[in-house]
Amino acid sequence: MRDRPDDDDVQENDPDLTRAVRTVTNATFVMEPPKLDPVYRQQLYQSLNQMQASVFYTVRDWCIKRVGNVTAEQFFYFINGGAGTGKSHLIKCIYTEASEILSKIERNAYETDPSKPTVLLTAFTGTAAFNICGTTLHTLLKLPRTLQPPYKGLGNRLDEMRAELMNAEIIIIDEISMVSKELFAYVHFRFQQIKGSNKPFGGMSVLAVGDFYQLPPVAYSKPLCVFEAGCIDLWNDNFQMITLTEIMRQKDDKAFAEMLNRIRVKDLTQELSDNDRELLSQAVTEPENCPNDVLHIFARNKKVNHHNSKTLALLYDDIITINADDYRKDARTGAMELQTTPCKGELNGLQDKLELAIGARVMLTRNIDISQGLVNGAFAKVATLVYSPCNSTHVQKLGLDLDLSQRRNADNQMLVYLERSEENITTKKGMVRRQFPLKLAFACTIHKVQGMSTTSAVVSLKEIFQAGMGYVALSRVTSLRGLRIIDMDESKLYANPDITESLNNMQKNHFEQIMPFYHLSQTLDRDKTFSIIHHNTQGLPSHIQDIQAHHELCLADVLCFTETRLQGFVAPSLHLDGYSMFERSRHVSYTNFSDMARKDGGGAAIYVKNHIVAHEVRYVHNVTDLEFVVVRVEAPFSALIVTVYRPPTYNVKSFLDNLRALLQCLEMLDVHPIIVCGDFNENLLYYGQKPIMELFASKGYAQKPRNEGDYETTMDLLESKERTSFVYKKKERKNGRKKERKKKERKT
Ligand SMILES: Nc1ncnc2c1ncn2[C@@H]1O[C@H](COP(=O)(O)OP(=O)(O)OP(=O)(O)O)[C@@H](O)[C@H]1O
C-alpha cells in the first residue's frame, strides 16, 4: 500500500506553485536566448547524440520553413526520456537555435517589435525554469492562483500580453510530468485568447519535455498523458512522442544507468532482479557513515528539518537567529506596528525564526529573480550578514554565494544580496511578515531535486509516498560511487502502471526523415551495399568537427566533398578516422584561367573507408581547368568515383568542354560503374536548358536518386553510369544556400 502523505507533505509536494503564483503574477518575464560564443555553440550542437540531433534538426528545419514562408504545420512533440537522458540539454540547444532562426522572419516593423521572443522557454517550477534559462508558466502567462474551470480571461491585461507575445511561435514546457490537466488547459486557452485563434494553443507549436515516471502533478491529479473522462484531452489528441534513450548523466557508469532504467518502469508488484539488488546494495550504508557535507535527500519535510538543525549544531559554533519582522495594523491609527516577537506563522510561509551561520548551506524558498538564479530551490552558502544602519542587531540583507550550477554565468563570482520578502499571514488578520525566504539545506526533499545533477548524495527511501519518488532521488547522482542509500526499502521503488499503458498508446515519431541514411543503415547488409554521400562542406577546415560529429556522414563508405576551400596544405586534423583522403585544391586545378586559380574557395575531396581498396587517378589526360577528384575503387567493388565542383562564376561553356573531356577519359579507364557527383551550380528547377545535366544524359548517365522530391532544391548532381545498388544524396541543411538559390531562381 502506498503511504498517504500528511498535510505537511501535501504542501511540500507543491514546492513552487503556491509561492510562484503568490509572488510573481505581477512580475514581467524576461526572455532572451543566451548569447553563446559561436565556437561553444557549435560544440554544443556537435555534442548532441543521434536522437537529440534528430529532434534538434527537425525543429530547426521547421523554423527554416517558417522563415522561408514555406507551409510549416503547427507541431506538438513530447520529448520523453528517463532521468539524465539530456532532455534539458537538448531544449537549451533548440531554444538558442530556433530563437535565432525565427528572429529572421520578415515582420512589419510598424506592427511588431523584433526584440520580442519567438520561442518561449518555460518550466513548471522555478528551479527547472532557471536550469534551462527560462521562466515559469505562471509568470509567463500571468496565471491565476486557482486554475479551476471556467477559464478566466486576461481582462485589461490582454493588450499588454499580446504586445509581449506577438512574435511567439513555439513554446517549450519542461517538467511536463508536473503539469496538471487544468494548468495545461489554461495555457491552451491563454494562447487562444492572446493569438485570437481557435487552433489548439492558439496556433503555437508546443514542445513538451519531461518524464512521466518522475514526479506527478500536485494534489494527486492525474498526469497529462493518463486519460481522464470528462477532461479536455489536449494531450492524446495532439501530441507525438519522441523518446531519448541514451543516458547522458550516468554515461560513465553504464551498469548504474541501466539499472536506473529498470527501476524507472518497475511496478509495485515486481521485484528487483538479483543483479540489480546486488548492485544497489553497494550503495546501502548507515547514516553515521555519511559525510555531513553531502546533500541528504528525504521524502518528508520533518526529516529534512531534523537533519538540518542537527547538522547546523554539529558544524557551527556561531549560530545566528534571525527573527521574522511581524507587523500588525493598529486599528486606531492604521499604522503598521512592529511586534516584539514573531507570531506562529503558516506551515509553508516565511519562517518565524531562521537559524543560520556564516558558511551554512541554504536554499531559497521563493522565486525572487529567475534571471539571477534566485529561484525557489536554488542552493547557496551564507557569505555575509548586512545589519541595519540604525539597528546593529537587525539583519537587513544576506550576502549569498550561489552554487556554481545556480549561476547564469560561471565566471560570475559575485555575491548576491537577498532582502527580506513580505507576505500576509493569512491566518492572522492584518498581520504582515518580513523575513528572508530561506531554509537550511544540508538536506532537502525529493521534490526539490527533480532535474538536478550531482556527483554525490545520501538518499533515504523511508516514507516515500508516491510513484516515481524513489527513482527521482536515486537518479540525481552521476555514478553509483557517489550514491549512499540509508533506510533501504525496495518496495519504495515503483512506477505508476497507468503511465506505462498511456505511453504505449501514444502516437510515436522517430524523425526518420531527418536522418534517413542513419535509419536505413541499421537494416542494410553492409557487405552488399556501397554508400556514397556528397556534401558541399563550405570549408573543410571550419566544418571538419561537424563532419566528425555527424551521425550520418561517417556511416558512408565514400564521402565526396566539394567547396573544401583547401589551399594546398592538408592539416592532419582534416583526416577522418577510418578513411583515406584524396583531394585537389582550386589553386592547382586551373591552367588557362589564372584569375580562377587565384580566388580562394572551391576544391574537391574524396574520403574512402579504409577497408576499401582505392587509388586516386591523379592525372587525367587532356583534362584541365576543372575542380575534380577521381578515385578508382577496386575491392570489394569496382567503380570510378568522381567529385566535381563548378563555381557559379565559372563560364558554363568552358566548364562543359572540360567536363566533356573528363567524361571521355573516364570511359577510357574502362571501370564501371562510373559515379560522378558534385555541386554544378545548375538550377534544376529552371524550365529552360540545363546543359550540364544534358551533357551527362548524352553520355549515358542517369541522375540518382530519381525521386521527384529530391529535385526540389537540387543544384547538385549525382550521376551514375550503370546501375549502382544504393546511392544516397545528402539533403541540404544550410539556410544560407537555400536563400542564395532562391535569389538565383528569381533572377533567372
Ligand atoms: N549531448 C550531450 N552531451 C554532453 N552532455 C550532455 C548531453 N546531454 C546531456 N548532457 C549532460 O547530462 C546531464 C543530464 O542532462 P539533462 O539534465 O539535460 O537530463 P534530463 O533528461 O533533463 O534529466 P532529468 O529528467 O533528471 O531532469 C547534464 O549534466 C547534461 O549537461
Image (cartoon, rainbow, N blue to C red):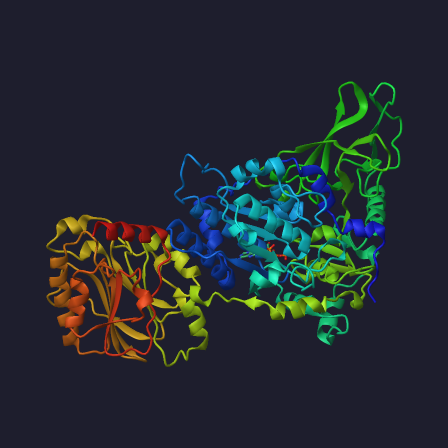
Determine the residue positioned at 87% across, 26% down: 339
Question: Where in the figure is residue 267, as x and y percent of width and height?
Answer: 73, 70
Residue 370 picture location, percent across and down: 63, 40
Q: Is residue 515 left or right of residue 492?
A: left
Q: How many marks?
A: 0
* Above/below status of 442 relative to 371: below
Q: Foreground: 736 or 176? A: 176
Percent x, y for residue 585?
23, 57
Give the quarter of the figure containing the N terminus: bottom right
Depth check, front residue: 107 or 716: 107
Q: Look at the image and tell me whether residue 30 can be seen.
A: no
Q: Is residue 136 left or right of residue 276?
A: left
The quadrant in which residue 652 appears is bottom left
Please indicate whether residue 232 sits to the left or right of residue 168 in the image.
right
In the image, taking residue 500 as reference, residue 106 lies left or right, namely left
Residue shown at 27% from the left, 62% from the top = 716
Q: Is residue 598 visible?
A: yes
Residue 64 in percent (x, y) is at 40, 52
- Measuring 65% from the left and 49% from the top, which residue is drawn there? 124
